Image (cartoon, grey):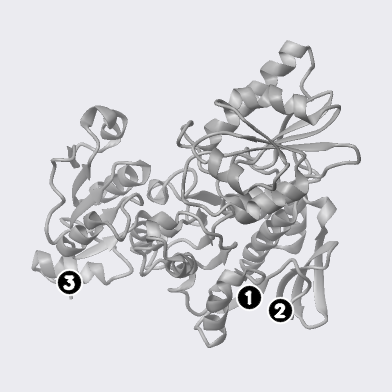
Amino acid sequence: MTPTDPQDRQTALATSSAWPDVEGLSVTVVGLGKSGVAAANALARRGARVLCIDDKPEHELSDALGRLLPDVQAHCGASGPLGRRGDLFVLSPGIMPHSRRFRDIQGMATAVLSEIELFYRLDRGHRHGLGHPIVAISGTDGKTTTTLWTAHLLRQAGRQVVVGGNIGDPLCDFLDTMGADDIVVAEVSAFQLYTCSAFRPRAAVVTNIAADHLDWFAGDMASYVRTKAKVGDAMGAGDTLFLNGDDPELATERARLQAGVPHAWANFTVRGLPHCGFGFDGTTLQWCLAPGAQVPLVDQSELGSLGAHPIEGIHNVENALGASALALSLATPLTAVRAGLRSFSLPSHRLEPVGSIGRVRFVDDSKATNPHAAIAGLQAIRIGEGERLVWIGGGSEKDADFAELAEVVGGRAASVILLGQTAERIAAVLPRGLDTHRVARLEDAVPLGLQLAGDAGVVLLSPACASFDMFRGYAHRGEVFATAVKRLQQAIGTAAV
Protein backbone atom coordinates (compact mmCIF):
# COMPACT_ATOMS: atom_id res chain seq x y z
CA MET A 1 0.00 0.00 0.00
CA THR A 2 1.41 3.40 -1.06
CA PRO A 3 1.55 6.02 1.72
CA THR A 4 -0.75 9.00 1.14
CA ASP A 5 1.07 11.49 3.37
CA PRO A 6 3.72 13.25 1.20
CA GLN A 7 6.49 12.97 3.79
CA ASP A 8 5.66 9.32 4.47
CA ARG A 9 5.88 8.73 0.73
CA GLN A 10 9.25 10.50 0.57
CA THR A 11 10.51 8.27 3.38
CA ALA A 12 9.17 5.12 1.73
CA LEU A 13 10.85 5.95 -1.58
CA ALA A 14 14.12 6.73 0.19
CA THR A 15 14.39 3.07 1.21
CA SER A 16 13.01 1.59 -2.03
CA SER A 17 15.30 0.38 -4.82
CA ALA A 18 12.63 0.73 -7.54
CA TRP A 19 10.72 3.93 -8.30
CA PRO A 20 7.85 3.26 -10.74
CA ASP A 21 6.02 6.44 -9.73
CA VAL A 22 7.63 9.71 -8.61
CA GLU A 23 4.68 11.98 -9.42
CA GLY A 24 4.72 14.82 -6.88
CA LEU A 25 8.00 13.68 -5.29
CA SER A 26 9.94 16.65 -3.90
CA VAL A 27 13.61 16.61 -4.93
CA THR A 28 16.48 19.07 -4.63
CA VAL A 29 19.28 18.66 -7.15
CA VAL A 30 22.53 20.25 -5.97
CA GLY A 31 24.86 21.25 -8.79
CA LEU A 32 24.06 22.06 -12.42
CA GLY A 33 26.76 20.05 -14.10
CA LYS A 34 25.86 17.46 -16.74
CA SER A 35 24.70 14.90 -14.19
CA GLY A 36 22.63 17.45 -12.28
CA VAL A 37 20.79 18.61 -15.40
CA ALA A 38 20.19 14.99 -16.48
CA ALA A 39 18.83 14.05 -13.04
CA ALA A 40 16.57 17.11 -12.84
CA ASN A 41 15.07 16.55 -16.29
CA ALA A 42 14.55 12.82 -15.73
CA LEU A 43 12.62 13.55 -12.54
CA ALA A 44 10.64 16.42 -14.04
CA ARG A 45 9.53 14.26 -16.98
CA ARG A 46 8.06 11.86 -14.45
CA GLY A 47 6.15 14.52 -12.57
CA ALA A 48 8.48 15.21 -9.64
CA ARG A 49 8.75 18.69 -8.08
CA VAL A 50 12.38 19.59 -8.79
CA LEU A 51 14.47 22.41 -7.37
CA CYS A 52 18.01 22.89 -8.71
CA ILE A 53 20.58 24.94 -6.81
CA ASP A 54 24.13 25.93 -7.73
CA ASP A 55 26.55 28.34 -6.09
CA LYS A 56 27.77 29.71 -9.41
CA PRO A 57 26.19 32.95 -10.67
CA GLU A 58 23.54 32.72 -13.36
CA HIS A 59 25.75 34.09 -16.16
CA GLU A 60 28.14 31.15 -15.70
CA LEU A 61 25.30 28.62 -15.93
CA SER A 62 23.43 29.88 -18.99
CA ASP A 63 24.03 26.68 -20.97
CA ALA A 64 22.90 24.41 -18.12
CA LEU A 65 19.86 26.56 -17.37
CA GLY A 66 18.90 26.48 -21.04
CA ARG A 67 18.85 22.68 -20.98
CA LEU A 68 16.52 22.40 -17.98
CA LEU A 69 12.87 21.56 -18.62
CA PRO A 70 10.42 24.44 -17.97
CA ASP A 71 8.92 22.80 -14.88
CA VAL A 72 12.29 22.73 -13.06
CA GLN A 73 12.92 25.54 -10.57
CA ALA A 74 16.47 26.85 -10.37
CA HIS A 75 18.34 29.14 -7.97
CA CYS A 76 21.86 30.30 -8.76
CA GLY A 77 24.44 32.06 -6.63
CA ALA A 78 25.98 31.51 -3.22
CA SER A 79 23.16 33.39 -1.46
CA GLY A 80 20.49 30.96 -2.67
CA PRO A 81 18.71 28.31 -0.56
CA LEU A 82 20.41 25.10 0.57
CA GLY A 83 17.37 23.14 -0.58
CA ARG A 84 13.97 22.14 0.76
CA ARG A 85 13.81 20.41 4.12
CA GLY A 86 12.53 16.86 3.82
CA ASP A 87 13.46 16.57 0.13
CA LEU A 88 15.31 13.74 -1.46
CA PHE A 89 18.62 15.30 -2.53
CA VAL A 90 20.60 14.39 -5.66
CA LEU A 91 24.11 15.59 -4.97
CA SER A 92 26.88 16.91 -7.20
CA PRO A 93 30.12 14.91 -6.94
CA GLY A 94 31.90 18.16 -6.11
CA ILE A 95 30.49 18.36 -2.58
CA MET A 96 32.95 16.63 -0.25
CA PRO A 97 31.46 14.43 2.48
CA HIS A 98 33.55 16.05 5.21
CA SER A 99 32.38 19.55 4.22
CA ARG A 100 29.92 21.65 6.20
CA ARG A 101 27.72 21.83 3.09
CA PHE A 102 27.39 18.04 3.01
CA ARG A 103 26.54 17.90 6.72
CA ASP A 104 23.93 20.65 6.34
CA ILE A 105 22.29 18.76 3.47
CA GLN A 106 22.25 15.54 5.47
CA GLY A 107 20.43 17.40 8.23
CA MET A 108 17.74 18.58 5.82
CA ALA A 109 17.35 15.56 3.54
CA THR A 110 15.15 12.51 3.78
CA ALA A 111 17.88 10.79 1.75
CA VAL A 112 20.95 11.76 -0.31
CA LEU A 113 21.52 10.09 -3.68
CA SER A 114 23.98 10.28 -6.54
CA GLU A 115 22.85 10.50 -10.16
CA ILE A 116 23.79 6.86 -10.87
CA GLU A 117 21.71 5.74 -7.88
CA LEU A 118 18.79 7.79 -9.18
CA PHE A 119 19.16 6.17 -12.62
CA TYR A 120 19.15 2.71 -11.09
CA ARG A 121 15.98 3.32 -9.06
CA LEU A 122 14.08 4.95 -11.92
CA ASP A 123 15.17 2.28 -14.39
CA ARG A 124 14.18 -0.51 -12.03
CA GLY A 125 10.77 1.06 -11.63
CA HIS A 126 9.94 -0.13 -15.13
CA ARG A 127 10.19 -3.45 -16.98
CA HIS A 128 8.50 -5.32 -14.11
CA GLY A 129 11.02 -4.04 -11.60
CA LEU A 130 14.02 -5.56 -13.38
CA GLY A 131 15.65 -2.62 -15.11
CA HIS A 132 18.43 -3.00 -17.66
CA PRO A 133 21.53 -5.09 -16.90
CA ILE A 134 24.37 -2.86 -15.70
CA VAL A 135 28.09 -3.49 -16.01
CA ALA A 136 30.05 -1.12 -13.73
CA ILE A 137 33.74 -0.26 -13.72
CA SER A 138 35.26 1.23 -10.56
CA GLY A 139 38.87 1.84 -9.50
CA THR A 140 41.51 4.55 -9.76
CA ASP A 141 43.24 4.05 -13.11
CA GLY A 142 42.14 2.24 -16.24
CA LYS A 143 38.42 2.80 -15.68
CA THR A 144 37.77 4.54 -18.98
CA THR A 145 39.83 2.11 -21.04
CA THR A 146 38.19 -0.89 -19.35
CA THR A 147 34.73 0.65 -19.79
CA LEU A 148 35.18 1.28 -23.50
CA TRP A 149 36.89 -2.08 -24.06
CA THR A 150 34.04 -3.90 -22.31
CA ALA A 151 31.48 -2.13 -24.50
CA HIS A 152 33.54 -3.03 -27.56
CA LEU A 153 33.60 -6.73 -26.62
CA LEU A 154 29.85 -6.76 -26.08
CA ARG A 155 29.23 -5.04 -29.41
CA GLN A 156 31.42 -7.62 -31.13
CA ALA A 157 28.78 -10.13 -30.07
CA GLY A 158 25.97 -7.99 -31.50
CA ARG A 159 24.76 -6.66 -28.14
CA GLN A 160 23.15 -3.23 -27.91
CA VAL A 161 25.17 -1.11 -25.47
CA VAL A 162 24.95 2.35 -23.94
CA VAL A 163 28.08 3.78 -22.31
CA GLY A 164 28.04 6.56 -19.72
CA GLY A 165 28.34 7.51 -16.09
CA ASN A 166 31.63 9.12 -15.18
CA ILE A 167 32.48 9.36 -18.90
CA GLY A 168 30.36 10.60 -21.76
CA ASP A 169 26.73 11.22 -20.91
CA PRO A 170 25.10 10.82 -17.47
CA LEU A 171 23.11 7.61 -17.13
CA CYS A 172 19.83 9.49 -16.58
CA ASP A 173 20.10 10.85 -20.13
CA PHE A 174 19.48 7.31 -21.43
CA LEU A 175 16.33 6.56 -19.43
CA ASP A 176 13.88 7.49 -22.20
CA THR A 177 15.89 6.26 -25.18
CA MET A 178 17.16 2.78 -24.23
CA GLY A 179 15.88 -0.25 -26.06
CA ALA A 180 14.51 -3.26 -24.22
CA ASP A 181 17.68 -5.30 -24.80
CA ASP A 182 20.27 -2.61 -24.10
CA ILE A 183 23.12 -3.26 -21.68
CA VAL A 184 24.41 -0.32 -19.64
CA VAL A 185 28.20 -0.12 -19.35
CA ALA A 186 29.03 2.52 -16.75
CA GLU A 187 32.25 4.00 -15.48
CA VAL A 188 31.55 4.92 -11.85
CA SER A 189 33.61 7.16 -9.60
CA ALA A 190 34.06 7.07 -5.85
CA PHE A 191 32.22 10.39 -5.70
CA GLN A 192 29.16 8.74 -7.28
CA LEU A 193 29.40 5.52 -5.26
CA TYR A 194 29.68 7.31 -1.92
CA THR A 195 25.93 8.03 -1.77
CA CYS A 196 24.79 4.75 -3.36
CA SER A 197 22.94 2.11 -1.36
CA ALA A 198 20.80 0.19 -3.87
CA PHE A 199 22.90 0.46 -7.07
CA ARG A 200 23.32 -3.14 -8.20
CA PRO A 201 25.32 -4.03 -11.31
CA ARG A 202 25.01 -7.46 -12.91
CA ALA A 203 28.81 -7.48 -13.19
CA ALA A 204 31.46 -5.09 -11.89
CA VAL A 205 35.21 -4.70 -11.68
CA VAL A 206 37.59 -2.73 -9.46
CA THR A 207 40.57 -2.05 -11.72
CA ASN A 208 43.11 -0.97 -9.08
CA ILE A 209 43.59 1.47 -6.22
CA ALA A 210 46.10 4.30 -6.01
CA ALA A 211 46.12 7.45 -3.92
CA ASP A 212 44.07 10.02 -5.82
CA HIS A 213 41.48 12.64 -4.87
CA LEU A 214 42.28 12.02 -1.21
CA ASP A 215 41.32 15.62 -0.50
CA TRP A 216 37.71 14.53 -1.17
CA PHE A 217 38.09 11.91 1.57
CA ALA A 218 39.95 14.20 3.99
CA GLY A 219 43.08 12.11 3.52
CA ASP A 220 41.38 8.88 4.64
CA MET A 221 42.79 6.20 2.31
CA ALA A 222 40.76 3.40 3.91
CA SER A 223 37.53 5.30 3.19
CA TYR A 224 38.64 5.86 -0.40
CA VAL A 225 39.33 2.13 -0.92
CA ARG A 226 36.06 1.09 0.74
CA THR A 227 34.10 3.50 -1.47
CA LYS A 228 35.74 2.23 -4.67
CA ALA A 229 34.82 -1.34 -3.69
CA LYS A 230 31.28 -0.29 -2.80
CA VAL A 231 30.37 -1.01 -6.42
CA GLY A 232 29.67 -4.61 -5.36
CA ASP A 233 27.95 -4.02 -2.03
CA ALA A 234 24.37 -4.46 -3.28
CA MET A 235 25.15 -7.49 -5.44
CA GLY A 236 23.29 -10.74 -4.97
CA ALA A 237 22.79 -14.13 -6.54
CA GLY A 238 23.58 -14.11 -10.25
CA ASP A 239 25.93 -11.13 -10.02
CA THR A 240 29.74 -11.23 -10.31
CA LEU A 241 32.43 -8.92 -8.95
CA PHE A 242 36.02 -8.95 -10.20
CA LEU A 243 38.93 -7.50 -8.23
CA ASN A 244 42.53 -6.81 -9.14
CA GLY A 245 44.24 -9.66 -7.29
CA ASP A 246 47.64 -7.95 -7.45
CA ASP A 247 46.61 -4.75 -5.70
CA PRO A 248 47.70 -4.62 -2.04
CA GLU A 249 45.18 -1.86 -1.27
CA LEU A 250 42.37 -4.32 -2.06
CA ALA A 251 43.61 -6.99 0.37
CA THR A 252 40.98 -6.08 2.98
CA GLU A 253 38.23 -6.24 0.37
CA ARG A 254 39.43 -9.64 -0.86
CA ALA A 255 39.42 -10.93 2.72
CA ARG A 256 35.90 -9.59 3.22
CA LEU A 257 34.71 -11.39 0.10
CA GLN A 258 36.39 -14.63 1.16
CA ALA A 259 34.50 -14.46 4.45
CA GLY A 260 31.28 -14.89 2.49
CA VAL A 261 29.05 -12.80 0.24
CA PRO A 262 25.80 -13.61 -1.61
CA HIS A 263 27.34 -13.15 -5.06
CA ALA A 264 30.11 -14.66 -7.17
CA TRP A 265 33.52 -13.01 -7.28
CA ALA A 266 36.95 -13.67 -8.74
CA ASN A 267 40.38 -12.09 -9.09
CA PHE A 268 42.28 -11.12 -12.19
CA THR A 269 46.07 -10.99 -12.09
CA VAL A 270 49.05 -10.30 -14.34
CA ARG A 271 51.37 -12.29 -12.04
CA GLY A 272 50.46 -15.78 -13.15
CA LEU A 273 47.35 -17.92 -13.30
CA PRO A 274 44.83 -18.02 -10.44
CA HIS A 275 42.92 -21.19 -9.57
CA CYS A 276 39.78 -19.48 -10.81
CA GLY A 277 39.54 -16.11 -12.54
CA PHE A 278 41.64 -14.40 -15.18
CA GLY A 279 45.42 -14.38 -15.46
CA PHE A 280 48.49 -13.73 -17.55
CA ASP A 281 51.36 -16.20 -17.93
CA GLY A 282 53.80 -13.63 -19.32
CA THR A 283 52.71 -14.21 -22.91
CA THR A 284 49.01 -15.08 -23.09
CA LEU A 285 45.87 -13.77 -21.37
CA GLN A 286 44.03 -16.75 -19.88
CA TRP A 287 40.55 -17.50 -18.58
CA CYS A 288 41.09 -19.86 -15.64
CA LEU A 289 38.07 -22.08 -15.04
CA ALA A 290 39.64 -24.38 -12.44
CA PRO A 291 43.14 -25.42 -11.33
CA GLY A 292 44.91 -26.66 -14.45
CA ALA A 293 42.00 -25.75 -16.74
CA GLN A 294 42.67 -22.58 -18.74
CA VAL A 295 41.14 -21.14 -21.89
CA PRO A 296 43.57 -18.92 -23.82
CA LEU A 297 42.19 -15.55 -24.89
CA VAL A 298 44.92 -13.80 -26.93
CA ASP A 299 48.66 -13.20 -26.72
CA GLN A 300 49.71 -9.84 -25.31
CA SER A 301 51.24 -8.96 -28.69
CA GLU A 302 47.79 -9.26 -30.29
CA LEU A 303 46.10 -6.63 -28.11
CA GLY A 304 44.92 -3.86 -30.39
CA SER A 305 46.77 -5.41 -33.34
CA LEU A 306 43.80 -4.69 -35.65
CA GLY A 307 43.11 -1.24 -34.14
CA ALA A 308 44.64 2.16 -34.76
CA HIS A 309 47.91 1.17 -33.09
CA PRO A 310 49.20 -1.72 -30.92
CA ILE A 311 48.31 -1.55 -27.24
CA GLU A 312 51.34 -1.66 -24.98
CA GLY A 313 52.00 -1.93 -21.26
CA ILE A 314 51.22 -4.39 -18.48
CA HIS A 315 48.53 -2.00 -17.20
CA ASN A 316 46.67 -2.54 -20.47
CA VAL A 317 46.91 -6.30 -19.94
CA GLU A 318 45.10 -5.63 -16.65
CA ASN A 319 42.49 -3.56 -18.49
CA ALA A 320 42.02 -6.30 -21.08
CA LEU A 321 41.59 -8.96 -18.39
CA GLY A 322 39.02 -6.84 -16.57
CA ALA A 323 37.06 -6.20 -19.75
CA SER A 324 37.19 -9.87 -20.75
CA ALA A 325 35.98 -10.92 -17.31
CA LEU A 326 32.99 -8.60 -17.50
CA ALA A 327 32.06 -9.60 -21.04
CA LEU A 328 32.37 -13.34 -20.38
CA SER A 329 30.31 -13.05 -17.19
CA LEU A 330 27.46 -11.84 -19.43
CA ALA A 331 27.76 -14.96 -21.61
CA THR A 332 29.55 -13.19 -24.47
CA PRO A 333 30.83 -15.77 -26.96
CA LEU A 334 34.55 -16.49 -26.69
CA THR A 335 35.06 -15.76 -30.39
CA ALA A 336 33.64 -12.25 -29.93
CA VAL A 337 35.89 -11.59 -26.92
CA ARG A 338 38.99 -12.71 -28.80
CA ALA A 339 38.07 -10.60 -31.82
CA GLY A 340 37.37 -7.57 -29.65
CA LEU A 341 40.67 -7.84 -27.79
CA ARG A 342 42.45 -7.61 -31.14
CA SER A 343 40.34 -4.89 -32.75
CA PHE A 344 39.99 -2.41 -29.86
CA SER A 345 41.74 0.96 -30.09
CA LEU A 346 42.72 2.91 -27.00
CA PRO A 347 40.80 6.15 -26.46
CA SER A 348 42.61 9.42 -27.04
CA HIS A 349 45.25 10.71 -24.63
CA ARG A 350 46.25 7.24 -23.39
CA LEU A 351 49.71 6.47 -24.76
CA GLU A 352 48.52 7.87 -28.09
CA PRO A 353 51.20 8.50 -30.74
CA VAL A 354 50.68 12.04 -32.06
CA GLY A 355 53.55 12.32 -34.53
CA SER A 356 57.23 11.87 -35.23
CA ILE A 357 60.04 14.14 -36.30
CA GLY A 358 62.87 12.13 -37.75
CA ARG A 359 63.41 9.25 -35.34
CA VAL A 360 61.86 11.05 -32.37
CA ARG A 361 58.31 9.96 -31.46
CA PHE A 362 55.84 12.09 -29.49
CA VAL A 363 53.33 10.25 -27.25
CA ASP A 364 50.29 11.78 -25.52
CA ASP A 365 49.45 10.14 -22.18
CA SER A 366 47.69 13.20 -20.78
CA LYS A 367 45.07 10.98 -19.09
CA ALA A 368 47.79 10.05 -16.56
CA THR A 369 46.50 12.49 -13.94
CA ASN A 370 48.15 10.87 -10.91
CA PRO A 371 51.57 9.31 -10.17
CA HIS A 372 50.28 5.72 -10.40
CA ALA A 373 49.00 6.29 -13.94
CA ALA A 374 52.17 8.07 -15.02
CA ILE A 375 54.30 5.18 -13.70
CA ALA A 376 52.24 2.81 -15.85
CA GLY A 377 52.82 5.02 -18.88
CA LEU A 378 56.56 5.30 -18.28
CA GLN A 379 56.88 1.56 -17.88
CA ALA A 380 54.79 0.82 -20.96
CA ILE A 381 56.85 2.89 -23.39
CA ARG A 382 59.29 0.81 -25.42
CA ILE A 383 62.71 2.41 -25.70
CA GLY A 384 64.95 0.97 -28.39
CA GLU A 385 68.72 0.72 -28.27
CA GLY A 386 70.27 4.14 -28.62
CA GLU A 387 66.98 5.96 -27.95
CA ARG A 388 66.44 8.53 -25.21
CA LEU A 389 63.21 9.00 -23.24
CA VAL A 390 62.20 12.56 -22.40
CA TRP A 391 59.43 12.79 -19.81
CA ILE A 392 57.11 15.81 -19.54
CA GLY A 393 55.38 16.02 -16.16
CA GLY A 394 53.70 18.35 -13.71
CA GLY A 395 50.35 20.08 -13.38
CA SER A 396 47.88 21.12 -10.72
CA GLU A 397 48.31 20.21 -7.07
CA LYS A 398 46.37 17.31 -5.49
CA ASP A 399 48.75 16.60 -2.57
CA ALA A 400 50.09 13.50 -4.34
CA ASP A 401 53.20 11.62 -3.24
CA PHE A 402 55.78 11.71 -6.06
CA ALA A 403 58.50 9.58 -4.42
CA GLU A 404 57.79 6.31 -6.28
CA LEU A 405 57.25 8.17 -9.54
CA ALA A 406 60.61 9.92 -9.16
CA GLU A 407 62.33 6.55 -8.76
CA VAL A 408 60.76 5.23 -11.98
CA VAL A 409 61.55 8.46 -13.86
CA GLY A 410 65.15 8.23 -12.71
CA GLY A 411 65.41 4.67 -13.98
CA ARG A 412 63.83 5.30 -17.39
CA ALA A 413 64.17 8.94 -18.48
CA ALA A 414 67.28 10.59 -19.87
CA SER A 415 65.78 14.04 -19.42
CA VAL A 416 62.79 15.62 -17.66
CA ILE A 417 60.71 18.68 -18.49
CA LEU A 418 58.47 20.04 -15.71
CA LEU A 419 55.68 22.61 -15.69
CA GLY A 420 52.71 23.68 -13.60
CA GLN A 421 52.09 24.05 -9.87
CA THR A 422 53.84 20.80 -8.94
CA ALA A 423 57.05 21.36 -10.92
CA GLU A 424 59.22 22.27 -7.94
CA ARG A 425 57.81 19.54 -5.71
CA ILE A 426 58.53 16.89 -8.35
CA ALA A 427 61.99 18.33 -9.03
CA ALA A 428 62.82 18.09 -5.33
CA VAL A 429 62.42 14.29 -5.26
CA LEU A 430 64.04 13.43 -8.61
CA PRO A 431 67.44 11.70 -8.47
CA ARG A 432 70.39 14.06 -8.25
CA GLY A 433 72.11 14.59 -11.56
CA LEU A 434 69.03 13.81 -13.68
CA ASP A 435 68.84 16.34 -16.53
CA THR A 436 65.85 18.47 -15.49
CA HIS A 437 64.29 21.49 -17.19
CA ARG A 438 61.35 23.78 -16.47
CA VAL A 439 59.03 25.50 -18.93
CA ALA A 440 56.18 27.95 -18.46
CA ARG A 441 53.98 26.49 -21.20
CA LEU A 442 53.38 23.02 -22.61
CA GLU A 443 53.95 24.42 -26.10
CA ASP A 444 57.55 25.20 -25.06
CA ALA A 445 58.14 21.62 -23.92
CA VAL A 446 57.71 20.17 -27.43
CA PRO A 447 60.73 21.77 -29.19
CA LEU A 448 62.80 21.36 -26.03
CA GLY A 449 61.82 17.69 -25.90
CA LEU A 450 62.92 17.21 -29.50
CA GLN A 451 66.27 18.80 -28.70
CA LEU A 452 66.78 16.66 -25.57
CA ALA A 453 65.82 13.43 -27.36
CA GLY A 454 68.70 13.86 -29.77
CA ASP A 455 68.88 11.65 -32.85
CA ALA A 456 66.28 9.12 -31.68
CA GLY A 457 63.89 8.70 -28.80
CA VAL A 458 60.47 9.31 -27.30
CA VAL A 459 59.00 12.51 -25.88
CA LEU A 460 56.30 11.36 -23.46
CA LEU A 461 53.64 13.62 -21.97
CA SER A 462 52.50 11.65 -18.91
CA PRO A 463 51.99 14.42 -16.35
CA ALA A 464 51.13 12.53 -13.11
CA CYS A 465 48.94 15.51 -12.19
CA ALA A 466 45.56 17.00 -12.99
CA SER A 467 45.46 19.76 -15.56
CA PHE A 468 43.22 22.43 -14.12
CA ASP A 469 45.98 24.91 -13.31
CA MET A 470 46.58 25.51 -17.04
CA PHE A 471 43.93 23.64 -19.08
CA ARG A 472 40.22 22.84 -19.18
CA GLY A 473 40.96 19.17 -18.56
CA TYR A 474 43.32 16.35 -19.52
CA ALA A 475 41.82 16.16 -23.04
CA HIS A 476 42.50 19.85 -23.68
CA ARG A 477 46.06 19.36 -22.40
CA GLY A 478 46.58 16.48 -24.81
CA GLU A 479 45.15 18.50 -27.70
CA VAL A 480 47.54 21.38 -26.96
CA PHE A 481 50.44 18.91 -26.95
CA ALA A 482 49.41 17.33 -30.27
CA THR A 483 48.90 20.74 -31.89
CA ALA A 484 52.34 21.86 -30.76
CA VAL A 485 53.86 18.72 -32.30
CA LYS A 486 52.10 19.36 -35.62
CA ARG A 487 53.25 22.98 -35.67
CA LEU A 488 56.83 21.90 -35.02
CA GLN A 489 56.56 19.33 -37.81
CA GLN A 490 55.36 22.04 -40.20
CA ALA A 491 58.10 24.42 -39.12
CA ILE A 492 60.75 21.75 -39.72
CA GLY A 493 59.07 20.47 -42.85
CA THR A 494 58.43 16.95 -41.52
CA ALA A 495 55.22 15.18 -42.41
CA ALA A 496 53.20 13.58 -39.62
CA VAL A 497 53.79 9.88 -39.16
Q: Secondary structure at mark 2?
A: loop
Q: Give residue 264's position: percent from left, percent from top.
A: 57, 79
Q: Which mark is residue 336?
A: none
Q: Give residue 22's position: percent from left, percent from top.
A: 22, 58
**Labelled pair 3, 1 in contact (Cβ < 8 Å):** no
Q: In the figure, is residue 197 to the left or right of 49?
A: right
CA distance separating discs 2 and 1: 7 Å
**Labelled pair 2, 3 in contact (Cβ < 8 Å):** no
Q: Residue at x 70, y 25 (%)?
A: 448
Near-viewer residue (380 or 59): 380
Near-viewer residue (8 or 103): 103
Q: Residue furthest bottom?
A: 259
Q: Mark 2 vs mark 3: which is more N-terminal? A: 3
Could you tell me which quadrant the C terminus lies in?
top right
Q: Secondary structure at mark 3?
A: loop
Q: Residues within 10 Å of mark 2 (few under 14, many from 20)?
A: some
Q: Residue at x 60, y 23 (%)?
A: 443
- Which marked residue is nearer to the observer: mark 3 or mark 1? 1
Three-letter residue code for mark 2? Cys
- Which marked residue is nearer to the observer: mark 2 or mark 3? 2
Q: Which mark is residue 276?
A: 2
Three-letter residue code for mark 1? Ala
CA distance separating discs 3 and 1: 40 Å
Could you tell me which quadrant the N terminus lies in?
bottom left
Q: Which residue is mark 1?
A: 266
The image shows residue 226, relative to residue 428, as above or below, that is below
Q: Residue at x 78, y 31 (%)?
A: 361
Near-viewer residue (58 or 469): 469
Q: Which mark is residue 2?
A: 3
**Labelled pair 2, 1 in contact (Cβ < 8 Å):** yes
